[in-house]
Image (cartoon, rainbow, N blue to C red):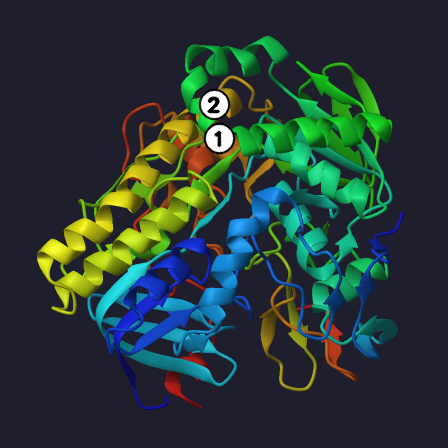
Amino acid sequence: MAEALSFDVAIVGGGPAGQAAAIQLAGHGLSIAVVDEQARPGGQILRQPPRAFRVAHWLAGRSYRALHAQFAAFEALPVTWLGGHSVLDAAPGRLLLHGPDGAVSVTARRILIAAGCQDLAVPIPGWTLPGVYSAGGVQAMVKSQQIVPGARVLLAGTHPLQLVIAEQIVRGGGTVAGVLFAQSRAAMLAPMLRDPAAAFRRATDLLAGQAALATLRRAGVPVRYGVGLTALRGSDWVSEAITTDGTIACDAVGLCYGFVPQSGLPRMLGAEVVQAGPAGGWRCVHDEWMRTSVAGVFAAGETTGVAGAAAAAAGGALAGIGIARDLGSLAPDAAERAAAAPRRVLARHRRFAALLDAIADPRGHFPALEPETLVCRCEDVPHAALCAEVATGASANAIKRATRCGMGLCQGRNCEPSLLRMIAAPDPGFTARFPARPVTIGDLAGD
Amino acid sequence: MSAIRIDDDVQRGTPIRILVDGAPIACFEGETIATAMLAADRLAFRQDTRGAGRGMFCNMGSCCECMVTLVGSGRRVRACLADARDGMEVSTRG
């Protein structure tokens, strides 16, 4: 293994939160590394096209404007960009990474985890057929690789983001077979009527949703409410979706039931997490400077709760200010003054996020599973095997040992929320284990 | 069925070619192995224990469902994170 790289601050995640933190930290003479699995910064929201591509008018919409500006500011910073690197292990003051040249050890006086979120993986009969994706996965194909994954793409679930994804597919010249919301339209509107002020403050997003609906209407895309997905069928790949209101022919499906924080690294560090929103998952707890319960470790962005890019950027800025203050680069009173604005923005956007959570609440809309439906995709553990173990009153960790659910390459990222829904009693979930990402023994040994 | 490359306003990298299970696939510099495969209607990246073909799921490195083997080095890589390189040989058979 190469000699350890040493920095004042190591930031995990090059999305809005990580970028905002780096921007705040710059100019204090601190050495900063930013680690990301993607080759280029941007996170999932601004998932960059490859450098070899030229994409005119890329993500030109109004809702992306602030993110483009932040990206440009970040790109101009003198930070060490460790793109294409995965975090395998995390401890206070230390990260173990895996990149193109094998394992890399990094030490840092402060660590910021801004690892973002992921789609809630929702099992449904047929969901392991090729051509079935998380909706975020479909969107990333469109944004970054400029590819629409099928000739007739179906989006289904409960989250309004599927309107935006469908619009991006249509604008890219693709065909959307339909957008299905399992909940009724009235159920989606009710939360907005309960907190119109919160809704109004994020008018840009609401307008984007309205514009998306108009585009879909012009393109003849059926947008339906109160229609749930029951099963996906096909032989070599998905070819039709069975819904509560008939069958839809399609050759790609994006499942869109919500998002959960990427909680693996905070949990590996021993940082306190609590249950996230109605979609499930765990969010990292933090104080007024975005410090976690572990000394020297900060968290920001959707690792601390899924609330959108603006909230992530505000949390990241606050973490950057907090770290500079912690390292003595910023006087406490100056930090307090600098923190006021991002704190206001964060609180405002979290209020909207609560509203969005209520609109998109997937509970009560999860598809019923067949006994042989695989819940754990990595280890091929069917629903029936989990039912049998859950009936014994076993914990998630005990069920993991008994069935191998959560023991595979994804380390339970996909199956844990499903299993915890099955376990009625409070359960801390799977213990986060090394390595967080797949790696060969040879790479760890430095061969 | 087929995935479509978006053409409007998009200029891709140099045309290259990779081999997937011995079959040549035309693609472009900058594309991931996953994109090259999807665009060539190769949706299965591996087989599960029941012998069923399994596709990529998350496209962001989390789910590891798109792991393929690079012939030669024997390295297992997530096809959604790994760039296609001219002449690269990929196996979906573990």
- Indicate the position of residue A421 as horizontal and vertical percent values: 42, 28
Which chain is home to disc 2? A
Q: Is residue A2 above or below residue A112?
A: below
Specify the label residue A292 is tagged with. none
Q: Which of B56 and A22 is in front in this view?
A: A22
Residue type pointed to by label 1: Arg
Instruction: Specify whether A84 is left or right of A195.
Output: right
Q: In this view, does A163 lie above or below A377?
A: above
Query: What residue is disc 1 on?
Result: A202
Q: Nearer the viewer, residue A160 or A384?
A: A160
Q: Is residue A209 above or below residue A129?
A: above
Residue type pointed to by label 2: Ala
Please report the residue visible at 66 percent of the width from the left and 37 percent of the height from the top.
A164
Contact (Cβ within 8 Å) of mark 1 with mark 2: yes
* The C terminus of chain A: image quadrant: bottom left
Which chain is home to disc 1? A
